[in-house]
Image (spheres, helix red, strand yellow):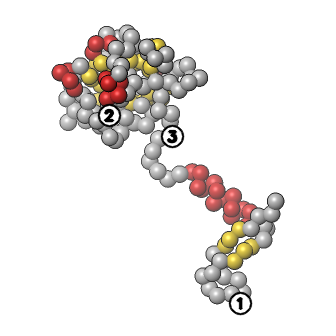
Amino acid sequence: MSWTILAWRPRAGAAAGRPHACRATRWCLAVAAVALALAGCGGGSGSSAPTYEVQATTIAGLGKVVADGQGFTLYMYAPDHQGASTCAGICAKQWPPLVLPRGVTRPTAGPGISTALLGTVRRSDGTLQVTYNRWPLYLWQGDTAPGQATGQAYDMGLWYTVSISGAVDRGTPS
């Protein structure tokens, strides 16, 4: 296989600013390798953690609460009573459960999270839902960016964030 790399420096006798093909020299290969490495580094602020990782996030007025690997706030549902998940159907569409991908059997503890409080519960559809202090965890479709807690005390006080200590946080975000 032969490689042709375009460089943006003018050749002697060529019009300035026009690309030319350079041979696959060590210099060209080194430049290409550096460019590929830099392209893979990414400069965005998005998290590279898996979504099923549970990590700590700080919400004004609530303190440190649990979030998924992308920084979205996680909630508990009071009728679950630290046991089986009772949110299914339309409930699970509005409040998607934090589930493990097929083949993964244990959630990941991210920064600020107690591994001893992490667990799973099997849902009626057979998937494994992540729990924290035995509370099945859910996302809220109303949270459109990491760090929001718009589902706090939602639906007559059935949905709350969970503090990193594992306690239900009934505070009010500010």
How far is disc 1 from disc 2 in space, using C-alphas?
A: 61 Å
Dividing the image into 4 quarters, which one contains the C terminus?
top left
Q: Which residue position holds label 1?
A: 13
In the displayed structure, would residue 53 be above or below residue 121? below
Using the rendered view, name the quadrant where residue 92 is placed: top left
Q: Which of label 2 and label 3 is nearer to you?
A: 2
What residue is rendered at 42% in x and 18% in y? Answer: 131
Determine which quarter of the picture holds residue 121. top left
Instruction: From the top left corner, tell me how far across and down residue 91 is, in percent.
Output: 31, 23
* Residue 132 in which image quadrant: top left
Q: Amino acid at mark 1?
A: Gly
Q: Which residue is mark 2?
A: 141
Give the residue at the far bottom of this rendering.
13
Picture layout, residue 5 above or below residue 118: below
For mark 3, what is the residue?
Answer: 48
- Alpha carbons under labels 2 and 3: distance apart: 21 Å
Residue nearer the viewer, 30 or 78:
78
Q: Which residue is at 47% across, 29% downward?
A: 53
Helix, strand or loop under label 3: loop
Mark 2 burial class by Cα count in 10 Å: few <14, some 14-19, many 20+: few
Pointer 1 and pointer 2: residues touching (CB < 8 Å)? no
Q: Earlier in the sequence, mark 1 or mark 3?
A: 1
Which three-letter amino acid code belongs to the residue tagged 3?
Ser
The residue furthest front is: 89
Q: Earlier in the sequence, mark 1 or mark 2?
A: 1
**Residue type pointed to by label 2:** Gln
Q: Residue at x 28, y 36 (%)?
A: 142
Q: Secondary structure at mark 2?
A: loop
Q: Residue 53, labelled with which disc?
A: none
